């Protein structure tokens, strides 16, 4: 398991990432497509982590060049021979 995580980390993906901790129990890979979130949870630490003001964080927008970055990540993962089943679900 550790070796697999190190291999994916070395790929230097732009959008796709391996969830850490308990979040990794749901899926081996996840996507980070947006910057911000409009759910407005009062306990959210997202704005602090991203060094954003809370009102700015509350307006979720697609990250810059998100589709190009996602396509590059999919190509990298497919070339590695890993996660083919997950990437196939994106339809890219
Ligand atoms: S990112 Fe923050 S505001 Fe959005 S759902 Fe998660 S905790 Fe709530």
Image: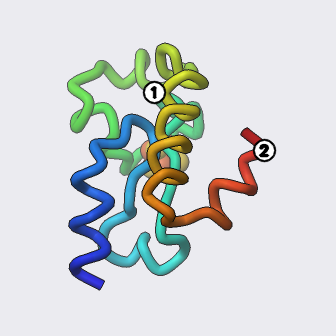
The image position of residue 70, as x and y in percent, is 54, 34
Up-down: is 79 above or below 24? above
| Vertical order, 9 against 35 (above or below) | below
Residue 92 visible? yes
Q: Earlier in the sequence, mark 1 or mark 2?
A: 1
Residue 85: x %, y % from top left? 67, 67
Q: Above or below — where is 3 with respect to 70? A: below
Q: Residue at (25%, 56%) from the top-left corner?
A: 9
**Residue 55, labelled with which disc?**
none
- The crowding category of the residue bearing disc 1, from other C-alpha atoms within 10 Å (few below 14, some 14 to 19, many at least 20), is some
Name which quarter of the figure residue 89 lies in: bottom right
Residue at coordinates 55% horizontally, 65% vertically from top-left?
Answer: 83
- Say which quarter of the image contains residue 35: top left
Q: Where does the C terminus fall, quadrant-wise?
A: top right
Q: Determine which of the numbered discs, if any, sits on residue 91 in the image.
A: 2
The residue to which callout 1 is attached is 35
Numbered disc 2: secondary structure: loop
Q: Residue at x 50, y 63 (%)?
A: 81
Callout 1 secondary element: strand
Q: Nearer the viewer, residue 27 or 35?
A: 27
Q: Is residue 31 left or right of residue 23?
A: right
66 sits left or right of 22 in the view: right
Residue that sits furthest to the bottom in the current view: 1
Q: Is residue 42 left or right of residue 71?
A: left
């Amino acid at each position: 398991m550790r070796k697999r995580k190190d291999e994916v980390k070395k790929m230097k993906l732009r959008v796709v990432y391996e969830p850490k901790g308990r979040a990794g129990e749901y899926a081996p890979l996840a996507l980070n497509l947006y910057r911000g979130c409009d759910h407005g949870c009062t306990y959210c630490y997202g704005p602090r982590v991203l060094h954003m003001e809370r009102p700015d964080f509350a307006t979720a927008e697609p990250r810059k060049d998100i589709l190009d970055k996602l396509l590059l990540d999919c190509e990298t993962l497919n070339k590695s021979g890993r996660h083919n089943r997950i990437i196939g679900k994106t339809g890219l």
